[in-house]
Amino acid sequence: MAAFARSAPCWVDVQLPDLEAGKRFYGELFGWTFRAGEGPYADAFSGGKLVAALAAKQDGRMPTSWGIYFATDDIAASVARIREAGGQVITEPVRAGRAGVLAQAADPGGAVFGLWQAGDREGFQKQNEPGSFCWTEVHTRRKDRVDPFYEKVFGFQGTDLEASGPDAARTGPDGSPPVGFRMWSPAGTEPGPDTAVGGRSVISDAFPAELPSYFLSYFAVEDCNRTAGNAVRLGGRISAPPFDIPYGRMAVLQDDQGAVFAVLQPPVSENGAE
């Protein structure tokens, strides 16, 4: 599989209390098949291509959540930049066999993300297609600290847009408009929607004060409304009902164990193609 550009999202996995229940949920929702990995871990495949992994939580205190990983060709240098930029290293670099080296960190707002230095495994074998990862964004209350953090650590260049994601459907308690959204483009590219690999959304006052900063990862689907309905049928919940954004139709969902993720149906062009 092709190598990932430095700082590009390259992998997602979810930590679940019940691995087998997770395989049933995502297997039916996205049509994924699974192959057992080392320990309580299962690789997920869409059309025979690697797209994600499910893991059984080893500690009940760990959150039930999806995690995002960014590619690096020098994980030690990336960890050093995280500390210099005011982030926190949660897990020092550790080798995952021959697959690669990983680390976990938190930005100055507390949102957790991972780093991945590839060995035998680069990351996704499929993305931006139905049943696979297509986008990630951090939701934070501290954009003034978080924006320069990601620019320094990953070299991202920002493009500010009107609100996107779940915030686009909500106004503040006083009826104020949603807070703006920032797209990230990798260093060396022309910043803008065509080169963006992720983004930053602001958690507005419309949300509970106890809601922590977090990354929300998206999966592409053919039919957003149908996927949301199927998630409920499978025991999950709808956090943000399907609504339209400039890049398609999306919804925010929870699986049957509480892990939050988003789905995105790309828009149909005038000639009928997505």
Image (tube, rainbow, N blue to C red):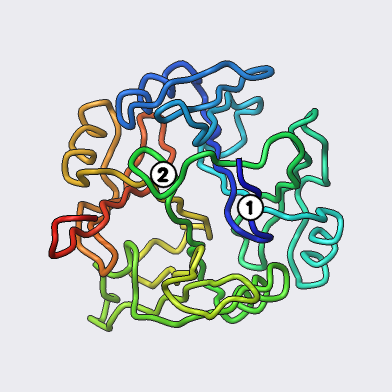
Q: Residue at x 63, y 52 (%)?
A: 4
Tell me where residue 131 sits by quadrant.
top left
Q: Residue at x 65, y 79 (%)?
A: 148
Q: Earlier in the sequence, mark 1 or mark 2?
A: 1
Q: Secondary structure at mark 2?
A: strand
Q: Amino acid at mark 2?
A: Val
Residue 234 versus residue 118: which sits nearer the camera?
118
Residue 8 position in % (x across, y down): 60, 58
Residue 109 position in % (x across, y down): 61, 66
Q: Is residue 62 above or below residue 67?
A: above
Q: How many marks?
A: 2
Picture quarter with the C terminus: bottom left
Q: Residue at x 68, y 17 (%)?
A: 39
Q: Residues within 10 Å of mark 1 (few under 14, many from 20)?
A: some
| Residue bearing mark 1 | 4
Residue 81 versus residue 56: which sits nearer the camera?
81
Q: Amino acid at mark 1?
A: Phe
Q: Secondary structure at mark 1?
A: loop
Q: Residue at x 28, y 27 (%)?
A: 235
**Direction from residue 267 to residue 73 in the image, left or right:** right
**Direction from residue 170 to residue 198 in the image, left or right:** right
Residue 246 position in % (x across, y down): 26, 69
The mark lying in front, picked from 1 and 2, is: 1
| Residue bearing mark 2 | 260
Tell me where residue 143 sits by quadrant.
bottom right
Picture quarter with the N terminus: top right
Q: CA distance from mark 1 to mark 2?
A: 25 Å
Q: Is residue 150 above or below residue 41?
A: below
Residue 161 position in % (x across, y down): 38, 81
Q: Residues within 10 Å of mark 2 (few under 14, many from 20)?
A: many
Q: Is residue 202 above or below residue 174?
A: above
**Direction from residue 108 to residue 9 in the image, left or right:** left
